[in-house]
Image (cartoon, rainbow, N blue to C red):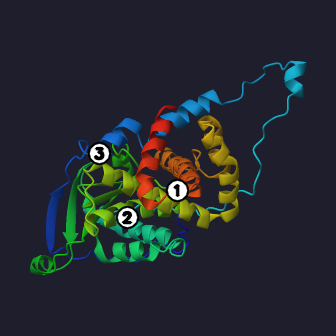
């Protein structure tokens, strides 16, 4: 889950823009959810568990240079990964530098990345029956806030405060696009907190497809909690929600490039069944853009998590796993991956 959004239409305008009138400012501070189930898992795994895993495997699987081969070794057939055409990606054009007051720069950043995010998720509207619903849910219910720190946000409402109070929306949730200076304090490039009330998205994404795929994952969590009443503090509900979110990601990966997905499953499922995780990770890196500097470190971890867990979910589905079984599939898969960190 084309390298992030193609912003060929985004240009610096020569004419100065008028500053929007700010009628009301509402300060909010998002609570730290490190004590809930999802927070504990994120902390235990570290950016979905794979940054450390990637670093370890990159070191352990790197070929040794100038090491002489014995004649016996030279004759051994190499277990080469089947090569496939490089998957197409859409690069995200980073926002141009803005002059002016800090608050106005942050406001422009939110507007810029809102368009990018909607474009990214819109690429997958036909990938799964749930996608049009999630896209419409985001358009109707997302509000955008300015980050004033790693946790604190400032919501700017362009209108009358009485209209804001009058039109309260129970499905409303906050999206905060985080500038680079705050990204290092984030456990992941995208995560949801405060019982689905806030989603934080790093502005360091480089590939549109990954942004769309991971955003769809998080939107499914917000929808589950806000609309379906999922209690993320309940372990069974939490695990099922994660399993269903990765099942969705699996469909988006397949939609992105069916041939690459077919190769992943044909070669990856046997590796998963034999618990050959380093080889599976190497296969993932050979098929999908999950290597730095093509993507950011957090983006690489999320991308690899998406690919590896999609293999686990697909293998379970082929064995007849139901939606209710996916919670156990997810819990077991993350346990296996943790052992290889």
Does residue 99 appear in the picture of this structure?
yes
Name the residue that disc number 2 marks.
219
Asked if marks 1 and 3 touch (Cβ < 8 Å), the reply is: no
Label 2 vs label 1, nearer the camera: 2
The answer for how far apart the CA atoms under marks 2 and 1 are is 20 Å
Label ID, residue 275: none
Q: How crowded is the residue under tag 3: few (<14 C-alpha within 10 Å), some, or many (20+)?
A: some
The tag earlier along the polypeptide, 3 or 2, is 3
How far across and how far down the image is residue 153, in percent?
Answer: 22, 57
**Could you tell me which secondary element the residue under label 3 belongs to?**
helix
The one nearer the camera, 287 or 207, is: 287
Name the residue that disc number 3 marks.
37
Label 1 vs label 3, nearer the camera: 3
Find the residue positioned furthest to the left: 162
What residue is rendered at 55% in x and 47% in y? 308
Compared with 260, 132 (above or below) is below
Quadrant position of the N terminus in the picture: bottom right
The answer for how far apart the CA atoms under marks 3 and 2 are is 18 Å
How far across and how far down the image is residue 336, in percent?
Answer: 50, 37
Judge from the rendering whether residue 219 lies leftward or rightward of residue 209; answer left or right. Answer: left
Asked if marks 2 and 1 touch (Cβ < 8 Å), the reply is: no
Does residue 92 appear in the picture of this structure?
no
The tag earlier along the polypeptide, 1 or 3, is 3
Find the residue positioned furthest to the front: 320
How far across and how far down the image is residue 195, in percent?
Answer: 24, 57
Judge from the rendering whether residue 243 lies leftward or rightward of residue 26; answer left or right. Answer: right
Label ID, residue 206: 1
What residue is rendered at 66% in x and 52% in y? 264
**Could you tell me which secondary element the residue under label 1 belongs to?**
loop
What residue is rendered at 46% in x and 72% in y? 131
The tag earlier along the polypeptide, 2 or 1, is 1
The one nearer the camera, 97 or 144, is: 144
């Amino acid at each position: 889950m084309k390298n992030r959004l193609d912003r060929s239409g985004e240009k610096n305008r020569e004419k100065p823009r008028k500053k929007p009138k700010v009628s009301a400012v509402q300060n909010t501070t998002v609570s730290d959810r490190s004590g809930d189930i999802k927070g504990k898992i994120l902390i235990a795994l570290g950016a979905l568990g794979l940054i450390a895993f990637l670093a370890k495997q990159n070191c352990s699987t790197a070929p040794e240079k100038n090491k002489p081969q014995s004649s016996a070794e030279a004759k051994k057939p190499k277990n080469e990964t089947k090569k496939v055409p490089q998957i197409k990606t859409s690069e995200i054009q980073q926002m141009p530098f803005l002059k002016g007051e800090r608050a106005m720069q942050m406001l422009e950043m939110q507007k810029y990345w809102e368009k990018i995010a909607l474009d990214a998720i819109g690429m997958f509207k036909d990938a799964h029956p749930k996608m049009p619903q999630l896209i419409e849910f985001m358009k109707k219910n997302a509000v955008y806030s300015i980050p004033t720190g790693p946790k604190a946000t400032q919501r700017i409402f362009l209108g009358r405060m009485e209209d804001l109070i009058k039109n309260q929306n129970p499905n409303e949730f906050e999206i905060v696009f985080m500038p680079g200076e705050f990204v290092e304090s984030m456990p992941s490039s995208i995560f949801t907190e405060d019982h689905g009330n806030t989603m934080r998205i790093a502005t360091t994404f480089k590939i549109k497809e990954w942004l769309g795929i991971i955003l769809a994952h998080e939107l499914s969590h917000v929808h589950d909690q806000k609309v379906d009443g999922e209690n993320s503090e309940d372990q069974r509900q939490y695990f099922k929600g994660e399993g269903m979110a990765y099942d969705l990601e699996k469909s988006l990966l397949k939609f992105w490039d069916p041939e690459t997905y077919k190769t992943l499953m044909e070669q990856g499922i046997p590796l998963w069944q034999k618990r050959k995780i380093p080889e599976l990770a190497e296969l993932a890196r050979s098929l999908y853009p999950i290597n730095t500097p093509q993507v950011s470190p957090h983006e690489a971890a999320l991308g690899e998590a998406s690919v590896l867990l999609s293999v686990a979910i697909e293998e379970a589905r082929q064995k007849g796993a139901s939606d209710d079984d996916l919670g156990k599939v997810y819990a077991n898969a993350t346990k296996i991956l943790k052992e290889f960190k």
